[in-house]
Amino acid sequence: MDRRFWNRFMISIMENIVAPYSVIRKIFPQLFLLGVAVYINSLVFMIYQHLDFISAVYAGVNVVTTVGLYAPNINQLPNTEKVILIITIIFAVGLYTSILQAIVSTVVNRSTWIDAKARWRGSHMKDHTVLVGEGEVIVSAAKRLERLKVDYIILTTDKNIQEISPDKIIIADPKEDKNLLEAGILNAKNAIVCMKDDMETLLITLKIQKLNPPLQVISVVKNSSLADAFKTAGADVIIPYDDIVGRITASAAISNHVAGLILQDRLNENLVIGVFDVKKSIKISDLPEGTIPLIIVKHDGKLDPFFEKNYQLKEGEKIIILGDPKIFDKIKEMLE
């Protein structure tokens, strides 16, 4: 079956069928405790009143819930039965109330059903991207993946994420292996990790590498000096977020032609991408030394990355260049 058809259509259908079973599994401990409490009350009536099991359950529930449809003659009850019933009723009334309240609140809570669908979706997707963390980086990456039609699941502790489909968000602690597995880390194509604390990002990177060593992990860090630690942890791509923001902001202050940057080592950290309108025809070879022409954007919008050094730029075209922003003003003057 085609991966995209499975991720986009089959999972959307099946998760609605499976979600009720996932919710039942979540409230199973409460249901089990409720069953034990009912059985203990029923056992008293079976032993002392010699009722059959169904009648005993009926009697026990009636007494504890104070409905009173079954009320044996109190004067005929043995003292032992009275003492046992007093103890079980005292404990059962509070237990019944708390358990039933927990069950009802879980079942009627909309987020419970959404969470069940998201976990089932994540654990059954294939070749998707797992976004782990908090903040605008995760939200922005998710929006970009949505536009690119790339399947993804978000694993986060942030309950206030908006503008993202809730059935693609698992609200849980990413540091727990169980939650990473339910996000589909074993079948994912890659993972992006960006926590508020770099140490948490490092820990999750290590956990992902332990669970799925071949997986490509992209770690977003705030302290670029930790890059070596993340490489040791198994991160394939390390993005120093604050460093990048600082570089692009400073570069934009030098030239308003800055359009982006390429991740480089510290020897080339001044290289950024610039976009220029061609208003005067010149040869590529006439561009200042130290610039690297990347792509020519033709009049019809088509991209041409294959051009000769002596190619004559034409008026109306655009050229995308990699270079130091300090010389961008000189390039602008040459093209105007």
Image: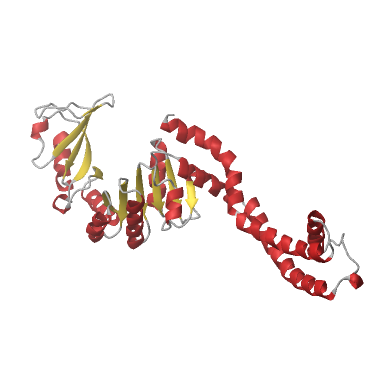
Which quadrant does the N terminus fall into? top left
Look at 57% across and 41% down and name the residue there. 18
Q: Residue 182's x, y, as percent?
A: 46, 48
Task: Look at the picture and state if 84 lies above or below 171.
Answer: below
Depth check, front residue: 122 or 186? 186
Depth check, front residue: 110 or 68? 68
Task: Look at the picture and state if 270 lies above or below 11.
Answer: below
Specify the quadrant of the image occupied by residue 38: bottom right
Q: Is residue 159 left or right of residue 261?
A: right
Report if residue 162 is visible in the image: no
Specify the quadrant of the image occupied by residue 17: top right
Look at 87% across and 61% down and name the residue there. 70
Task: Look at the picture and state if 265 lies above or below 200.
Answer: above
Report if residue 301 is visible in the image: yes
Q: Residue 336's x, y, as percent?
A: 17, 34
Q: Is residue 215 left or right of residue 135?
A: left
User: How did the renderer colour the structure?
Assistant: secondary structure
Q: Residue 162's x, y, as percent?
A: 49, 49
Depth check, front residue: 192 or 17? 17
Specify the quadrant of the image occupied by residue 229: bottom left
Q: Residue 214's x, y, as percent?
A: 30, 45
